[in-house]
Image (tube, coloured by chain):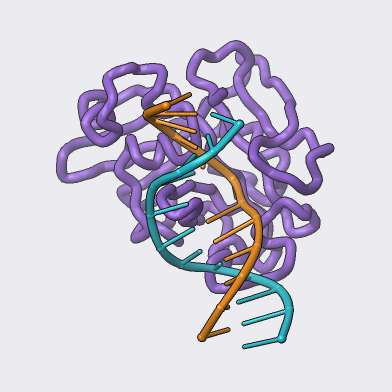
Chain colours: A purple, B orange, C cyan
DNA sequence: CTCTGGATTGAC
DNA sequence: TCAATCCAGAGG
């Protein structure tokens, strides 16, 4: 979790890092295998039109969580990056399940390992992350990211982001090449 | 206050 | 291909 000022670089360095959530039921964790970068100069970003009540965590200190509610039923999880006031973040889009897999299956109401965490709202549901983690410090809390320099032998694929209608030309989606847990 | 659409998912 | 489901953000 060092060097989070450069958002594009951070999105790539987060690949291979571990996302951990310590819950009363036990620890759930996974390896980050897919990310997307968002900045304030980017029309697809929540921060594009400036700070609002929903996106204010994006303008806060790097290394904290930005969690938002969307489509009337889903939550997505971001790692805030960039300088304070910049409005930048990295969306975590997919994990490779590591610990607490039985808990994840229960949370997701599904048994297929490949379908547990291969999407931004799926991994939030699998880990049991809720809105009360919005703004949480990811270095010290029960929700944490550890080991951002794990990507050395893995190959990164660059692609256009999913589900956006603006600035689609930016290749700001990153994932570990051929990893089976990357979203569709 | 009303209206619109969304950084998605799962079923058909 | 499309419904679910509801709130943030924009406009009046």
Q: Is residue A134 left or right of residue A84?
A: left
Which residue occupies 68% across, 33% down? A173
Q: Residue A103 location, x and y as percent? A: 22, 31
The quarter of the rendered structure image containing the C terminus of chain A is top right
Which residue occupies 83% across, 37% down? A169
Tell me if I can see residue A65 in this picture: no
Q: Residue A145 location, x and y as percent? A: 45, 40
Above-or-below relation of A150 to A137:
above
Q: Residue A46 location, x and y as percent? A: 65, 58
Above-or-below relation of A110 to B6:
above
Out of A144 and A35, give the one closest to the viewer. A35
Dividing the picture into quadrants, the one containing residue A34 is: top right
Q: Residue A57 location, x and y as percent? A: 54, 64
In the rendered image, the residue lying farthest to the left is: A25
Which residue occupies 48% across, 19% down? A181
Out of A175 and C11, give the one closest to the viewer. C11
Out of A16 and C9, give the one closest to the viewer. C9
Which residue occupies 19% across, 36% down? A26
The total number of labels drawn is 0
Tell me if I can see residue A54 in this picture: yes
In the rendered image, the residue lying farthest to the right is: A169
Q: Is residue A149 left or right of residue A44?
A: left
Q: Is residue A15 left or right of residue A116?
A: right
Q: Is residue A134 left or right of residue B3?
A: left
């Amino acid at each position: 979790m060092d060097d989070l000022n450069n958002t594009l670089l951070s999105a790539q360095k987060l690949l291979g890092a571990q996302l951990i959530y310590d819950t009363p039921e036990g620890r759930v964790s996974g390896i980050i295998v897919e990310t997307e970068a968002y900045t304030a100069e980017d029309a697809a970003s929540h921060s594009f039109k400036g700070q609002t009540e929903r996106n204010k965590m994006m303008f806060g200190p790097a290394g904290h969580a930005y969690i938002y509610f969307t489509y009337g039923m889903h939550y997505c999880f971001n790692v805030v990056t960039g300088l304070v006031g910049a409005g930048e973040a990295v969306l975590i889009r997919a994990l490779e399940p590591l610990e607490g897999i039985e808990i994840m299956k229960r949370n997701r109401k599904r048994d297929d390992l490949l379908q547990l965490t291969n999407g931004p709202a799926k991994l939030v549901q699998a880990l049991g992350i809720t809105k009360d983690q919005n703004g949480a410090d990811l270095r010290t809390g029960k929700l944490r990211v550890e080991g951002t320099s794990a990507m050395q032998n893995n190959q990164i694929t660059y692609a256009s982001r999913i589900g956006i209608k603006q600035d689609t030309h930016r290749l700001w989606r990153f994932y570990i090449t051929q990893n089976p847990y990357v979203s569709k």
